[in-house]
Image: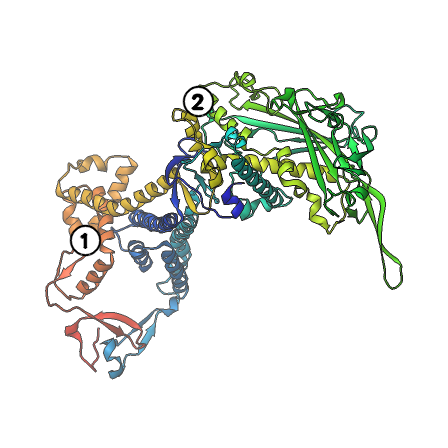
Amino acid sequence: MSAQLQSGIHSHDAYVGFWTNWSSGKIQGATVTLTRRNGGLLVAFLALFVATAGRSFWRIICFMLHCFLSKPSSPQDGLYHQRQALLRNNEAALSAAWQLLEMMVVWKKSFRSPMSATRCQNRMLVPIQFRTNVIRHGICKKRFPRDLGFNDYSKAADKVYRRLLPITAAAITISVCFTIAGIFSSNVTTNDGNEILLTGRNCGILDLDTILNNITLLDAARSQDARRAQGFFDYVRTCYGEGNTAGTDRCRFYVKPRLALQVDSNAPCPFTNEICHSTTGNLRLDTGYINIHEDLGINAPPKDRFSLRIVHQCAPLKADGYTTIETEIDRNNSNVPVNFTRVYYGSWNNMNFPEYKNYTFQKGMPYTRTMSKYSLGLDSDYELGFVEAYQNNSLNRAIRFEPIPQLLVPNADLALYFLSAPYVVFQNKVDDPWFSAHGEGPMTRNLATGKVVARYFTKDAMISTVGCTTQQQICNPNTGKSIQPRCEELRGEYMNYQQSTSKLWDTDSQRETFEWVYSIFKRSRLTMINLVQFAGPTALAARHSLFSGNQGVLPSNQWQIEMENIVSASLASLQDVFADASEGPPTAKLHDAWRRPESNNTAAKRACQNQKLISTKFFSFSVLGLSLILSLGAIFIILEFCLEPVIGQLHKSTYSRPRDIEPAENIQNSSNPADKEFKNRTRQIETLHAERRVTDLSRASTQISLYDTMKAARHMEWNSNSTFQLQRLAHDGIGCGTWERTSSNVPVTRPNQTLAMIGIRGPSGRHLCLVSPDKIEIGEEIKK
């Protein structure tokens, strides 16, 4: 297992910058990886940027609503003017919604209470700061009757919601949407685990020839493989178990926490029926098609990908007829006879000792182990042994195991696993064929009464065997014209693959990528045999309930659990080997055996630089998502700042040049609805002219059409409803100040001029108003 995963340290030699995640394609997969610190700053910036864009979007909506609802050509009620002022000056949608709700409540109540309208005969007008020095004399003399002049109150009250509720709903919707967008703006990361790309600057593989010819390197490699094997079994216990353990932090290293495994626990015997313990109830483990990109994290475009499939078939073997108990004289001590249990499932070829040729595996009997000088003493643990035979001796071993014909399976590798537990006792009888235990063992008695408290059981056979076949298949997932992936035939793992896979590849790039990746797979992955070899008895899941030689309860399918556990550890090894290869030598001791790809091997270098892992030390962002957020937000922000000045400039140019007006007689005689609307607008403006309520617009109407006048008036109302302009209008309305820049956003008075003060009016002292300084007389009434 890679050093980072084994130690739990999540530090990787990650690539920081722009790259393409081919899981999402060339455009959507454009990704940028940043360090944790810089990524956190970007996430915070995105949240603030979305909030700013939301504010700008609201201001654009306010401008559009203000212009759409503007009616400057006729007098309007107070609700209209408050709504227009709110749309002009409110910066936040949520604040606007709150104020609109308050307006609805107050205006609805006001329209439903016409008797509250009063007229006072005497009114006192004083500044607030002099309020305590004044004696109030004004009293209300008369109330308007309920049925006099208020016939429209109920109708107006019913229209309050109609006039304010849609705007309120829009404000709430915009506020909620942009708040959610700000919260989820961090989802532009590729995923919550943050996929990263390794730099691969130290990528390579271990040279087996160099290791085998150097005892120091060989010892270092064996120690490293033993640590890896134990790490993979630990990973399987955490991440391949039942439930949702795959979602824990310890499992978030690879692009997939676990590889899928199709389990058939009622498979037929993979060998001839006469040698299997049962013709049914056997085990078939099929990995399915493991895609190097989707499952193993090798970031490659579709044209350079390939798939791998591994199939294991296992069955317990019969002991009767294949097991003997033999006694031999110890060659080193002629006076000590040694009893052995031997199994005969094949023989060894080219063995130097003729007596070792006939049997497959042997185990000393329990009562002889304490007598032999080679004995290790009482051993209360399991013991695992194994032999393997490869298809057509594909590893070219001088000494090799040759199985009996009953175990020969075409196009497959064979492995036999031998279990022995001479000093392990079982709390209950075990019906599992590999752990079978029904023999009466020691008993535990109560020291005081002598009564039997517990009875234990011993294993039925000294050696029990499970045989497994392994087959492998390489496929091209790019189907082309065919529906199914193009695959080679199932074969032994170490068979020559060049010929069988030569017709699978469409391009040289795909073939070269396959050859490099497959070379790593063959040299670094720990197979079932390797895991048993380096982990020993710790490979057994049954040991988790073993204490001081006392084995807890085991189910009747424990052997299937053990085989599935070992295969899962092999899959974990498969997940890890490519990350291991990209990050350099596992230990400094193996540096001399580390071989990097040739300088002209571009496919190998490309594969080395495209290994994906999951890391919490980095942030990976979608460039497309960032671009959409930044571009849309920038459009809203720029539009907010440019929309009003541009429209104002257009209206300014409209005022500055006269236009041809269609003769009045043509409009008067026209039946066009637009011309009828024009005539109605004309009458309204003429009425306003007569009442001296329009000044600037009346002069403008002599140069431009009345339609353009109304459009310009809407923009003029927008300007006049700004905070500074409303302030100017209030002071200017009572004659305070000589104002300049009256059409700009910031009107100013002449230097050293004072403006009106805040005063109160009426007997209740609650009517606030502006008071001109030259009208203030302390202690006296000011009558209207």
- Count the labels in the image: 2
Image coordinates of residue 229 in percent, x first then y, are: 59, 40
For badge 1, the amino acid type reads Val
Question: Which image quarter holds the N terminus?
Answer: top right
Q: Is residue 266 visible?
A: no
Residue 694 rendering spot, x and y as whole percentages: 18, 53
Q: Residues within 10 Å of mark 1 (few under 14, many from 20)?
A: some
Is residue 193 toward the left or the right of residue 726 in the image?
right
Q: Which mark is residue 694?
A: 1
Q: 393 or 364, which lies in front?
A: 364
Q: Is residue 318 above or below residue 164?
A: above
**Left-right relation of 699 to 373:** left
Residue 90 is situated, as x and y percent measured from the top left of the image, at 31, 56
Q: Quadrant of the C terminus?
A: bottom left
Per the rendering, the mark at residue 564 is none
Left or right: residue 225 versus residue 664 is right
Callout 1–callout 2 Cβ contact below 8 Å: no
Nearer the camera: disc 1 or disc 2: 2
At label 2, counting other C-alpha atoms closer than 10 Å, the crowd grade (few under 14, some 14-19, many 20 or more) is some
Residue at disc 1, secondary structure? loop
- 408 left or right of 221? right
Residue 443 appears in the rendering: yes
SS type, badge 2: helix
Q: In the rendered image, which residue does mark 2 sit on?
A: 509
In the rendered view, would you say 130 is above or below 88?
A: below
Amino acid marked by disc 2:
Ser
- Cα–Cα span, label 1 and label 2: 80 Å
Residue 197 rendering spot, x and y as whole percentages? 43, 38
- Give the answer, above or below, for where 754 lies relative to 342: below
Q: Residue at the left extreme?
A: 751
